[in-house]
Structure formats: structure tokens, C-alpha cells
């Protein structure tokens, strides 16, 4: 029986995946798994019992990834599970930036008691007129799960779509519409596009990648859409450009005092993945990742350990070792198995940066003696008997 804890409310459809063989607990010190959405784990004491953290969503900046890795805790996220919800809001952001629907609705609300409202409308509506998006150029920076959906959808809205992603996967490339023009230099998007939407992870290399230099290349009526991470954009530079008339609009899903209420800023209260469908999809995917790891030792969509999949175990035993990525460690593991008279039927070793993951299928059950010898090795964080 595995115990799990929910650090945030998790959709019941996801918890239903953990019915058989799992029990919910309110005490993290009893839990093998933790499900989380937005709760910060940085100041939490992570117990030795905890083997896995699953984030029901894409962003993991609320989780101490390195601290988890060095405790042998695999951290998962759910990429793509909320992609459609975010895509739809990006499209809504484009429409709202093109035609001042918000301003018009607010005006009608302010005049709701005015008996002359209907007569005033024909004159007043000119203040909220805008443009159509058909025929305009959209630049999509980052062609992952969300970026591809946005790009493909925009082609059906008769937009001319440019896509930029130097690291696009083969699978993503297959799913990208042939009508999307793949550009090699992001500067081409800055220069050419009327709408620019960013969908890349927040890394040192991407932090504030849309900055003053990028804005200087853009058209003065360009619209920037940010539904990925606020720190991907130098928002101080954007606010200044909007005030000076060097940009048309900035649409962001990340409220803060830099942009809230500023001229040309449409700030949405982080609603990108706030749909019933997205929350359900993320919860189910997170629960499935937990089950596959705890029951089979398989890793998929981890952000701190490498992906590794040996399917279901058909031998007498399976053991998983989470360790530093260092030379000679596999030889030491196999020596221990030999010393303990355990034959290896199959094995795999994968690495990701400083961390590595090894799994061994065995012709005999793993022994406590072998486990203790592995745990005593320098650089070994955790040894799990999967079967």
C-alpha cells in the first residue's frame, strides 16, 4: 500500500487513478508521493519516505528540484496536459488586443442606467474599433505542446504564421502545419510579425529574452503575448515602449505591479490552464506518472532525473538506484550483485546533467545486504526495491 499527500486540491478524476493500492494521508512524513499544483515546497522538510513529487501542471519553480534530486526524489510535471486551455486563451488574448472589447463592455456597463444608451452607441463605438487578425502575421517563439497548437490554430484563422524553435523535436515537427513558416532567426519574427507570442521554458538563456533590443526591432503596432512566464519578458522595457507608442499592446497572464493598470497592458489573472478540462488532464497525468514510477520504477516527464522505461517487470526482482552521474558507478553496482550472488537479467542506465538513474531486473529478489552495500556507496542518493 502506497500513501500519498495532496499539497493542493487535486481533481477527483486524478485521485481516482490512485484508488487501488493507494491511500491518501495528511502527513507528508507518511507519504511516498506528493501531488502539488501551486503550493511552495522550498521551505518544506522533505522526509526520507518521499519518493516522488508530481506537479499537476507544467511549471516547477515552486519545487526545489536540486534538493529533491539529492534526496532521490523524482519530480514530474505534466507537459501538454493543459496545452489546449492555454492555446484558447492565447487566441482570446489576440482578439482582445485587436479590438477593444473590454473598453466597450465597460462603457456599456457604465451607461446601463442611461435611457439614451442605444442612441449613444453608434457614436461611442468608434472609440473601441480595432482590426481583424486575418491576414496579419503571427510569430510563435517555441514550438512545444502549446506553441504548436497556437501556430496551427492561427493558420485556420487566415493568419500568416512564423514559427521559431531551434530545438524543435521530431514529434513536434510532424505535428506542425505545413502552412507554418519555420524561421531560423528569432529576429525575423521581431521584425516581421504583427503579433508575437512566446512559449519557451524559463531558463538562464531565455530570461528576459524579449528585451529592449528585441522591442527596438518590432513594428510600433506590434502586440506581445506572454502566457508562458512573466520573466521571459523585460516588462519594464515593454511598459516604457507602450508609453512611448513603440508598441501597441502587451497581453500577459501574470499579474504584477509592473504591468497592472499600465497603458496598453491587458493583464489576465493567470487563467491559462484554469479550465475544468485542463485541471482534470493534469491530475490524471500526474497520478499516472506516480503509479508508473512507484509500481514499475519507470520515469517519464521528470524534470530532475532522466526518462527511463523498462516496462513491467517480468523477472523475480527489480531495483532502481538514484545516484550521481559519475564514472565507474555501474561497474560497482554489478560487483555488488556478484558478491551477493544475484544475477542481472536486464539493466539500463540513463543520465541527465549531474544525476543518473539505473534500473536492474534480477533473476532473484533483491537482498537487504545488496541494498545496504549500494547505499554506502558515495554518490548514491536512494535505492528502491521496486519488486
Image (cartoon, rainbow, N blue to C red):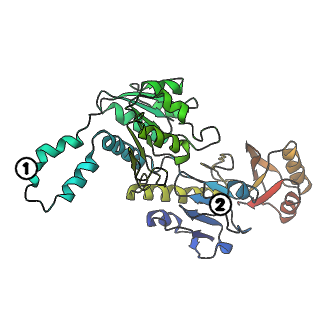
SS at badge 2: strand
The image quarter in which residue 354 lies = top right
Nearest to the observer: residue 286 or residue 160: 160
Q: Is the residue marked by circle 2 packed among few (<14), some (14-19), or many (20+) residues within 10 Å? A: many
Percent across and percent down for residue 177 are 40, 29
**The N terminus lies in quadrant:** bottom right
Residue hosting label 2: 52
Q: Is the residue marked by circle 1 packed among few (<14), some (14-19), or many (20+) residues within 10 Å? A: few
Mark 1 and mark 2: Cα distance apart in space: 63 Å
Residue projecting furthest to the front? 244
Residue 342 marker:
none
In the displayed structure, 128 sits above or below 257; it is above
Residue projecting furthest to the right? 339
- Left or right relative to 381: residue 186: left
Residue 119 marker:
1
Q: Residue at x 19, y 55 (%)?
A: 108
Amino acid at each position: 500500500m502506497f500513501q500519498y499527500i495532496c499539497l493542493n486540491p487535486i481533481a477527483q478524476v486524478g485521485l481516482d487513478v490512485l484508488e487501488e493500492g493507494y491511500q491518501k494521508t495528511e502527513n507528508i512524513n507518511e507519504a511516498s508521493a506528493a501531488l502539488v499544483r501551486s503550493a511552495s515546497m522550498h521551505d518544506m522538510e522533505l522526509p526520507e519516505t518521499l519518493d516522488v513529487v508530481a506537479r499537476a501542471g507544467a511549471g516547477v519553480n515552486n519545487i526545489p528540484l536540486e534538493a529533491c534530486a539529492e534526496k532521490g526524489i523524482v519530480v514530474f510535471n505534466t507537459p501538454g496536459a493543459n496545452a489546449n486551455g492555454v492555446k484558447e486563451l492565447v487566441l482570446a488574448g489576440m482578439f482582445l488586443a485587436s479590438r477593444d472589447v473590454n473598453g466597450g463592455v465597460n462603457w456599456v456597463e457604465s451607461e446601463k442606467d442611461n435611457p439614451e444608451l442605444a442612441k449613444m452607441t453608434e457614436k461611442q463605438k468608434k472609440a473601441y474599433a480595432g482590426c481583424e487578425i486575418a491576414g496579419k502575421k503571427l510569430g510563435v517563439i517555441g514550438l512545444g505542446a502549446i506553441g504548436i497548437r497556437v501556430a496551427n490554430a492561427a493558420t485556420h484563422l487566415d493568419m500568416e504564421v512564423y514559427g521559431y524553435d531551434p530545438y524543435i523535436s521530431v514529434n513536434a515537427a510532424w505535428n506542425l502545419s505545413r502552412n507554418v513558416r519555420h524561421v531560423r532567426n528569432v529576429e525575423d519574427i521581431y521584425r516581421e510579425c504583427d503579433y508575437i507570442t512566446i512559449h519557451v521554458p524559463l531558463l538562464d538563456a531565455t530570461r528576459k529574452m524579449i528585451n529592449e533590443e528585441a522591442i527596438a526591432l518590432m513594428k510600433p503596432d506590434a502586440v506581445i503575448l506572454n502566457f508562458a512566464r512573466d520573466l521571459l519578458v523585460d516588462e519594464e522595457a515593454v511598459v516604457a515602449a507602450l508609453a512611448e507608442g513603440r508598441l501597441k499592446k502587451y497581453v500577459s497572464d501574470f499579474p504584477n505591479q509592473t504591468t497592472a493598470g499600465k497603458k496598453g497592458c491587458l493583464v489576465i489573472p493567470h487563467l491559462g490552464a484554469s479550465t475544468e478540462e485542463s485541471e482534470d488532464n493534469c491530475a490524471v497525468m500526474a497520478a499516472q506518472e506516480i503509479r508508473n514510477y512507484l509500481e514499475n520504477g519507470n520515469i517519464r516527464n521528470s524534470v530532475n532525473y532522466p526518462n527511463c522505461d523498462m516496462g513491467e517487470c517480468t523477472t523475480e526482482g527489480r531495483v532502481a538506484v538514484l545516484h550521481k552521474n559519475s564514472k565507474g558507478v555501474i561497474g560497482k553496482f554489478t560487483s555488488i550483485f556478484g558478491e551477493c550472488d544475484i544475477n542481472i537479467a536486464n539493466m539500463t542506465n540513463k543520465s541527465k546533467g549531474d544525476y543518473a538513474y539505473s534500473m536492474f531486473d534480477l533473476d532473484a529478489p533483491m537482498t537487504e545486504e545488496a541494498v545496504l552495500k549500494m547505499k554506502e556507496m558515495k554518490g548514491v542518493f536512494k535505492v528502491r526495491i521496486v519488486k
